[in-house]
Image (cartoon, rainbow, N blue to C red):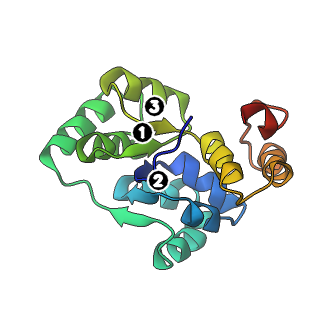
Amino acid sequence: MDLPDAILVTDTSVLVNFLRIDRMELLRDLPCRFVVTDHASGELTDFYPEQVERFNAALAAGYVEACTVTDEAALDIFGRLTGTTRLGVGESATIAHAMVTGAGVAIDDRRAINEARRIAEGLVIVRTADLMVRMIQEAMLTVEEADAIKDDWAANHRFRIPVASFAEMM
């Protein structure tokens, strides 16, 4: 999948993957801006307190940007998405903000991706694996380095990318 050189509204799932391995500079170095809604950052605080310090450092360094969902249309979409009880507030806010602002979405949750595709035809959706492929393409990481990160996620952080090597995705 081609990663846009624009804005990606980033869900907690993608953020946590990079926070856990202390590699937020990888997001900084991609040719797009990463925006995190207050709802997604709230999930981070509530469910991943050990990552809050790294997240705050990434915000302060400008690796990611914070935003508050205040647009009436976005709040309407947010309300509809959270009303289904299929998605959390972070996923719902991320999708709603991206839809209204014309940004893409960086998200790994399968249920949220399916819901986003259902309600927002044409919405650019990227996963952590797509970001890693782009990092390889941009020569930020070698395939071997990316595979080592993938293996670390699987062994230590309960996140799996279903390929033996990123070489399969190139």
Percent across and percent down for residue 4 are 46, 46
Element under label 2? Answer: helix
- Residue farthest front in this picture: 138
Q: What is the x, y in percent for residue 28?
A: 55, 66
* Structural distance between the alpha carbons of marks 3 and 1: 9 Å
Rendered image quadrant of residue 57: bottom right
Residue 169 is labelled as none
- Asked if 114 appears above or below 31 in the picture, the reply is above
Residue 165 x %, y %: 83, 37
Marks 3 and 2 close (CB-CB < 8 Å): no
Q: Residue at x 41, y 33 (%)?
A: 87
Question: Is tag 3's residue or tag 1's residue first in the polypeptide sequence?
Answer: 1
| C-alpha distance separating marks 3 and 2 | 15 Å
The furthest residue to the left: 72
Residue at 21% over, 43% down: 74
Asked whether 113 or 76 is in front, the reply is 113
* Quadrant holding the N terminus: top right
The reply to whether discs 2 and 1 touch (Cβ–Cβ < 8 Å) is: yes
Label ID, residue 43: 2
Q: What amino acid type is highlighted by mark number 3?
A: Ala
Q: Which mark is residue 112?
A: 3
Mark 2: amino acid: Glu
Q: Earlier along the polypeptide chain: callout 3 or callout 2? A: 2
| Residue 142 picture quarter | bottom right
**Quadrant holding the C terminus:** top right
Q: Earlier in the sequence, mark 2 or mark 1?
A: 2
